[in-house]
Image (cartoon, rainbow, N blue to C red):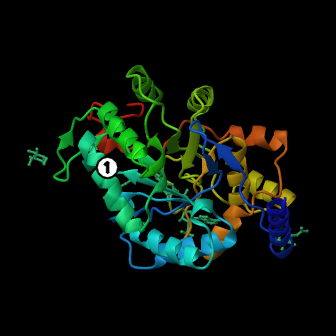
Amino acid sequence: MLCNYVLLLVLCANFVFSDVIPAPKLKLRDGTEIPSLALGTWLGNNTKGRIEPHSTEVENAVSAAIDLGYRHIDTAYAYKVEDQVGRAVIKKIAEGVKREDLFITTKLWNDRHAREAVVPALRESLDQLKLDYVDLYLIHWPVGQFGNQSYDYTDYVDTWRGMLEAKALGLARSVGVSNFNQQQIDRLAAAGLELPAVLQVEINLNLQQPSLLAYCRDHHIVVMGYTPFGSLFPSKAREDAPPPRVDDPTLVGMGEKYNKTVTQIIVRYLLDLGIIPIPKALKPAHIAQNFAVFDFSLSQEDRDWLKTYDKGYRTIPQLKWLDHPYYPFEKS
Ligand SMILES: NC(=O)c1ccc[n+]([C@@H]2O[C@H](COP(=O)([O-])OP(=O)(O)OC[C@H]3O[C@@H](n4cnc5c(N)ncnc54)[C@H](OP(=O)(O)O)[C@@H]3O)[C@@H](O)[C@H]2O)c1
Ligand SMILES: *[C@@H]1O[C@H](CO)[C@@H](O)[C@H](O)[C@H]1NC(C)=O
Ligand SMILES: *[C@@H]1O[C@H](CO)[C@@H](O)[C@H](O)[C@H]1NC(C)=O
Ligand SMILES: *[C@@H]1O[C@H](CO)[C@@H](O)[C@H](O)[C@H]1NC(C)=O
């Protein structure tokens, strides 16, 4: 009773002193809860290839995000920023944020697909993150590849067994997969193994994946959607990328109607698809905008319009792995 009263006070205080509404939570098939919006931490590629981390840019973004109300951070061993995420999280916990209120997702890289390599790989990530456990550990890709670039043909079903061992040890509260297709998830089930709690795949206006989302709904698998802005920004769009760009008149008009930015309209729409969008942003203004999406709703008519941008167009096809037997995407 007292507890409830205190909780109510805290909620009211939050409501009065900040106009940011927290992200609602979704329930995972294993019973745990996951915040429905995550901050992305991959620095991305420019024309010269991978952007390498400096020292504190991601740490600063994660700190700002937690201050603004984000409770879910998406990272990966391969992003080389787990140390920065860890420093921000430790600092915020020292300032009073509770570990159990944060949800940290990280991923197993392709060079650790051997079943017995999974737990040691996760322990390395935990060292970087300075945590005892992550909330969610994902197989980053179904495709195995050693450090020397030669393919590792380890069956991802075996890798999944290693993931379940990590969960049994309590090192990951939940486990899931990323960039798996429907047949690959079916193979985990056919092996008699627990299904992934989460599937993380690319989801944006140009790649809405309705049939994969329906499959996941049917199997109680929560979907996290990466690269939520797809080809919205001209600087990131390839020549062949379908519209819209950020200056699209219909989207700009929609933004004016709701007094929201085009990016906020898109994040709201992705939430309405029932997925967890993972917008990445380093700029504090972007981080704030992307989270201020829980105080409005789009009309059915506007959602119907946004659906028309779905062209099955992938911004991250990873064609370099096309000839791997476990390449997950359409081959043409
Ligand atoms: N599982 C996988 O294989 C996989 C693959 C790709 C991505 N991911 C995850 O998904 C996350 C997001 O995907 P992404 O990084 O590819 O792309 P994204 O989130 O679609 O786009 C990031 C870009 O959008 C800009 N931006 C963000 N919010 C904005 C706003 N409100 N207004 C204007 N510009 C804004 C960012 O700028 P600033 O940074 O300058 O603010 C950055 O340049 C990644 O960081 C990663 O965590 C996972
Ligand atoms: C980013 O660049 C690296 C290095 O050139 C490349 O190996 C990788 O495939 C690129 N990633 C994406 C998603 O394009
Ligand atoms: C690449 O690394 C793997 C694993 O260490 C090894 O088995 C394989 O022989 C290496 N391939 C080449 C071409 O060096
Ligand atoms: C529109 O949004 C801006 C930024 O969130 C806010 O400052 C402003 O008060 C809003 N205007 C109206 C009319 O709600």
> Would you call the spot at circle 1 few (<14 residues within 10 Å), some (14-19), or many (20 or more)?
many
- Image coordinates of residue 279 in percent, x first then y, are 58, 58
In the image, taking residue 248 as reference, residue 110 lies left or right, namely left
Q: Which image quarter holds the N terminus?
A: bottom right
Three-letter code for the amino acid on which mark 1 is drawn: Val
Given the current orientation, which residue lies at the most extreme top position? Answer: 190
- Name the residue at 74% across, 60% down: 22
- Name the residue at 83% across, 50% down: 297
Q: Secondary structure at mark 1?
A: helix
- Image coordinates of residue 150 in percent, x first then y, are 17, 45
Ligand 4 located in image quadrant? bottom right
**Res 80 visible:** no
Please tell me which residue lies in front, 218 or 124. 124
- Image coordinates of residue 275 in percent, x first then y, are 63, 43
Please tell me which residue lies in front, 305 or 64. 64
* Position above or below: 60 against 122: below
Corner quadrant of residue 55: bottom left
- Name the residue at 55% across, 62% down: 280
- Image coordinates of residue 330 in percent, x first then y, are 42, 31
* Position above or below: 279 against 98: above
Q: Which image quarter holds the C terminus?
A: top left
**Res 95 visible:** yes
In the image, taking residue 34 as reference, residue 75 lies left or right, namely left
Instruction: Find disc 1 in the rendering and name its residue.
Output: 119
In the image, taking residue 100 as reference, residue 291 lies left or right, namely right
- Name the residue at 60% across, 79% down: 95
In the image, taking residue 55 as reference, residue 221 lies left or right, namely right
Please tell me which residue lies in front, 54 or 187. 187
